[in-house]
Amino acid sequence: MINMERKLWRLMLCMFITLPLLFQLTAGMLDPSAVYCEKLGYNFTIATTSEGERGMCQLPDGPHDAWNFLKGKSGREYSYCKLHGYGIKTITDEEKCAPIGSLDCAVCILENGTEVEVTRLMGLSFEEGKCGDGICSLGENYSNCPQDCPAPTTTTTLPPAKPTLPFYYIVIIFIFIAVILFFLLTRIKVQRSEGPS
């Protein structure tokens, strides 16, 4: 019983040590489809559909799902590849598609036949708060990154950005597991204190 109790305490300790690491991983990456859309000069918006919220890229022929556009599944004629005279195709390759965190992605086909993932060819970065990326991100302002952030026109202070919804799910799951472990440990202690009569 004592050995099991120690294992449960170690498990709880490991969970609470890894929780901050998970938060840093989810908070530090921009949406690749939004960055791609805006870097090409198109407008990125969030639309509410029957399936939930979707990122949309407003192309000259109308709105397209931003991820489908990034992956070369729609709006190909407005893609970086086509605008720069390259061929384009959608591939399924975890290694080549790693920059956007997807199994499938668009690759530009260069003159020599080489296939390069589109955001890699463009030199895009999805790290949040990287000065010089053309996006005024969390942690950047006019004082520390004037090339990305416009000069303030008012003195209104905005509230800090909230973490994305999936992070809350992770926290709730961790709390749920911690509560279960706490009750298990309490039960073990009660059983040990009652002991065999």
Image: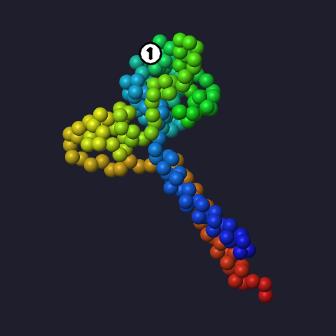
Give the residue at the far right of this rendering: 197
Give the quadrant of residue 16.
Answer: bottom right
* Numbered-mark total: 1
Residue at image mark 1: 83
Q: Is residue 80 visible?
A: yes
Question: Which quadrant is the N terminus positioned in?
Answer: bottom right
Q: Along the line of sight, which residue is nearer the eye, 92 or 47?
A: 92
Figure coloring? rainbow
Q: Along the line of sight, which residue is nearer the eye, 75 or 79?
A: 79
Q: Along the line of sight, which residue is nearer the eye, 195 or 29?
A: 29
Q: Position of residue 152 (x, y in %)?
A: 23, 40
- Element under label 1? helix
Q: Is residue 55 visible?
A: no
Residue 24 vertical placement versus 63 (above, below): below
Give the residue at the far bottom of this rendering: 197
Which three-letter amino acid code belongs to the residue tagged 1? Leu
Q: Residue at x 79, y 88 (%)?
A: 197
Residue 81 vertical placement versus 93 (above, below): above
Mark 1 packing: few (<14 Cα in 10 Å), some, or many (20+)?
A: few
Q: Position of residue 2 (x, y in %)?
A: 71, 75
Q: Along the line of sight, which residue is nearer the eye, 62 or 136?
A: 136
Give the residue at the far front of this rendering: 112
Q: Position of residue 47 (x, y in %)?
A: 44, 34
Residue 187 vertical placement versus 59 (above, below): below
Q: Residue at x 55, y 53 (%)?
A: 170
Lateral position of residue 14 relative to residue 135, left or right: right
Q: Residue at x 46, y 20 (%)?
A: 80
Give the quadrant of residue 19.
Answer: bottom right
Q: Position of residue 78 (x, y in %)?
A: 45, 18
Give the quadrant of residue 71.
Answer: top right
Lateral position of residue 178 relative to residue 157, left or right: right
Q: Residue at x 30, y 48 (%)?
A: 158
